[in-house]
Amino acid sequence: MPFNGSGVFTPLITFIPDSDATAGDQNTQDEDFASGLTNCLTRDGQSTPTAALSMNGFALQNVGAPVGSGDAVNLLYLTSIISAPAPIIPVVGGTSDVITGAFTPPVTALVNGSQALVRFTAENTTTTPTFQADSTPAAQISMNGGQQLLIGSIAGAAAWGLLIWDASLGQWSLTNPAPVEAPGVVKMLAMQTIPAGWLECKGTSLTVAAYPQLFAAIGYTYGGSGANFNIPDARGLVPRAWDDGAGVDPSRVFGSTQQDALQAHTHTYNNPAGSFNFTTTGGSFAYTSVNSAATSGVSSPGRTATETRMKNIAWMFIIKT
């Protein structure tokens, strides 16, 4: 071999001055040179290394921008990648729930913690959208350690989302899901216009097929059966916290309604000397006469109505679908 283990080239034949050299000797020497040159790297890329190359502490200068995932990078390119929070995908393809993206350089394999800064083109319409980076397999997008997205967790066109590859789950984790209310959440409105994705709580019967997420949240709690279920009817009612074992409103079923009522009680009447007339209509009445001084004072006329109620304001209850 023309090169030793340290890369030093040693001529095969040493010619002696003023001595004859045969053609065979010259051919052997030339063949040795040719063998040595064949083992060198060519500047036009015709040859490739057969083992790792050591730069011995020297710089590999003027490296071009990478094209493939296995290419070396120059300092300028590396600095631009480090300073950015994640590789940016300038063009996103696919649909709202089957999303694709093209990296530069192309991604050929996913490593735990790989990041993709994606500018989405539409709001997700399912809870299991997928993302595919170049030729890697498409994988589900989740949030908060594997939880399914809510419809609208991807905010919509032009919204930026940071995806991180979670190798343990085999999923892309969306780190900044849009704030979306879960199906079944109830809110009050100080207006009469109902926002998209919500319904007024007025006992409407819905089909399971049309509102699968809402049905999964509330089921038949408020009525219905089979292919239909009802949403709560909160019109004209005041909500009360579910007792849930506290003993304040015992044996109360979640989601049930109550009629208005007055707590059972008694009154004591201090009657000075004189007479007292009363009339009862139904029920019972107990009277005890107590001779004592009358208490002076003026009673204002009370408010009366067909129901017992507290002071209130009329707003609308809505439920997230």
Image (spheres, grey):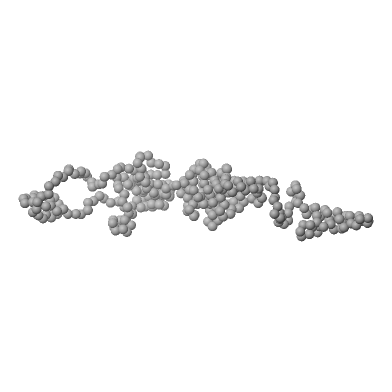
Instruction: Specify whether residue 93 is in view.
Output: no
Q: Position of residue 282 (x, y in %)?
A: 14, 52
For residue 27, side relative to residue 191 (left or right): right
Residue at left 6%, top 51%?
Answer: 273
Residue at left 23%, top 51%?
Answer: 261
| Residue 305, above or below 243 | above
Q: Position of residue 215 (x, y in %)?
A: 40, 50
Q: In the orientation shown, which residue stands out farthest toward the bottom?
A: 5
Residue at left 8%, top 50%?
Answer: 276
Q: Position of residue 88 (x, y in %)?
A: 57, 45
How many dots with numbers? 0
For residue 213, side relative to residue 249 (left or right): right
Q: Position of residue 119 (x, y in %)?
A: 53, 44
Q: In the orientation shown, which residue stands out farthest toward the left?
A: 274
Residue at left 90%, top 57%?
Answer: 16
Closer-to-camera residue (4/276): 4
Closer-to-camera residue (219/251): 251
Instruction: Specify whether residue 270 is in view.
Output: yes
